């Protein structure tokens, strides 16, 4: 049984290199981190979650849209749970599986995930990223991208160092979406500043992108999108 | 000598599956189409353009940023020119070359382009897309994506048909950016409508995305971004 906060879609993936792609989301409760600017803090507590079996999760996905064959597992950090039964069931149903995590907890069932959106936390999160588990993700994952949320100069420096360590992995620098500042002017002003930084930085390659969260631009900060 | 409207960057690619990536742009004058909602009509006339050799173009790119190794050739339609000398020079300088065109004019030098952003014109453009040349692009290009600008239901139907013809090619449905309506509210309201259509459409696969133009959201309709 998994503690499920929400199952929703089809909608678009608002983050990273698959931005704009159609997917459904399964948001599991629980997280081993407490980031200062967490934009999905409603996923931190497991008490309010529904308990569902893998087959019940698939049934709900099919009710939402049988034609959508991409599912994104998110949280919280979905890796606080033993994901093997859920991933195996999704694969048997022929879903393409994407997964979003900070990369703090590895488990072997993640090798079956098609695309890991790995989001190590930079200093402004207040968290201390586990770099050796991160290295395990990089070496074991089938396919992954790095997504770093940028609020401060120290965050940018962290991202640059990580890019220099893993230059071949696509990296996305993402505008930080602080609660209460999910409006267009604030997001775009931060985005322009981030683009300025990226485009003037001779120490990184063109394998690093800058992106806002598209779903927040379209709908603001709220569950279900 | 090429008629150059502008050389600018590094900035971000605002369109398609490479959205957010760092690139410089070379915009060549001239186009064989006259789309109703053209957002770069200043590139239609060759009279105002500077005439530059391939080596002069490379020199300007290096002055802008020697560390940026991605260049996007755009227009107008850059394929109204014989591109072989320019592409050969850019390759010799180790640039990754992207090219934006509607796919109306094929030439063999395009095989040297790393990524073609192919944007066939749907009915609201007022243009009649040449489907056989389009097929030549699909069969000959090294790598390509299809980008369809969507304003009307007929445009959407055109895109769907094209996707069904070429299901394995990544397709991006892009919000139409009509002159004078490059504001956030208008663009996002169109974007949400496009997402609604895409996410409810059981006749297309998850290989189709919906995206706005990121550079227009960030800076509005203007040259040099």
Image (cartoon, coloured by chain):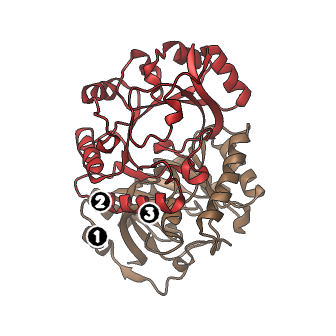
Chain colours: A red, B brown
Question: In the image shown, does A214 or B18 lie closer to the viewer?
Answer: A214
Q: Chain of mark 3?
A: A
On residue A160, which mark appears? none
Quarter of the image holding residue B202? top right
Residue A130 lies, with reference to residue A197, above or below; the image says above
Q: Chain of mark 1?
A: B
Locate residue B59, reporting x and y percent: 26, 72
Residue A219 visible in the snapshot: yes
Callout 3: 10 Å neighbours few (<14), some, many (20+)?
A: few
Of the residues tagged 1 and 3, which is closer to the observer?
3
Say left or right for B203 vs A116.
Answer: right
Locate residue B9, reporting x and y percent: 36, 67
Q: Chain of mark 2?
A: B
Say left or right for B61 vs B125.
Answer: left
The answer for how far apart the CA atoms under marks 2 and 3 are is 23 Å
Q: For numbered disc 2, what is the local secondary structure?
A: loop
Residue B127 visible in the snapshot: no
On residue B64, which mark appears? 1
Residue A187 lies, with reference to residue B223, above or below; the image says above
Residue at the image point whose x is 64% and y is 33% from the top:
A8
**Label total for image:** 3
Q: Quadrant of the N terminus of chain A?
A: top right
Residue B121 lies, with reference to residue B8, above or below; the image says above
Locate residue B52, reporting x and y percent: 35, 79
Residue at the image point whose x is 56% and y is 20% from the top:
A3
Residue A129 lies, with reference to residue B91, above or below; the image says above
> What residue is disc 2 on?
B68
The answer for how far apart the CA atoms under marks 1 and 3 are is 23 Å
Locate residue A214, reporting x and y percent: 54, 50
On residue A189, which mark appears? 3
Callout 2: 10 Å neighbours few (<14), some, many (20+)?
A: many
């Amino acid at each position: 049984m998994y503690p499920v906060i929400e199952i929703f879609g089809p909608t678009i993936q608002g983050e990273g290199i698959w931005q704009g792609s159609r997917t459904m989301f399964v948001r599991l409760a629980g997280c081993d981190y407490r980031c200062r600017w967490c934009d999905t803090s409603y996923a931190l507590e497991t008490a309010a979650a529904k308990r569902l079996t893998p087959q019940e999760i698939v049934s709900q996905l099919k009710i939402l849209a049988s034609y959508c064959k991409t599912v994104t597992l998110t949280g919280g950090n979905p890796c606080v749970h033993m994901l093997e039964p859920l991933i195996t069931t999704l694969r048997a149903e022929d879903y393409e599986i994407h997964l979003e995590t900070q990369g703090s907890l590895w488990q072997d069932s993640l090798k079956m995930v098609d695309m890991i959106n790995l989001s190590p936390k930079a200093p402004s999160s207040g968290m201390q990223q586990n770099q050796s588990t991160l290295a395990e993700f990089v070496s074991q994952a089938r396919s992954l991208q790095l997504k770093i949320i940028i609020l401060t100069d120290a965050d940018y420096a962290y991202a640059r160092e990580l890019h220099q360590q893993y230059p071949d992995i696509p990296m996305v620098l993402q505008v930080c979406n602080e609660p209460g500042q999910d409006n267009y002017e604030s997001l775009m002003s931060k985005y322009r500043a981030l683009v300025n930084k990226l485009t003037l930085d001779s120490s990184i390659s063109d394998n690093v992108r800058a992106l806002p969260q598209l779903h927040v631009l379209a709908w603001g900060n709220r569950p279900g999108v």
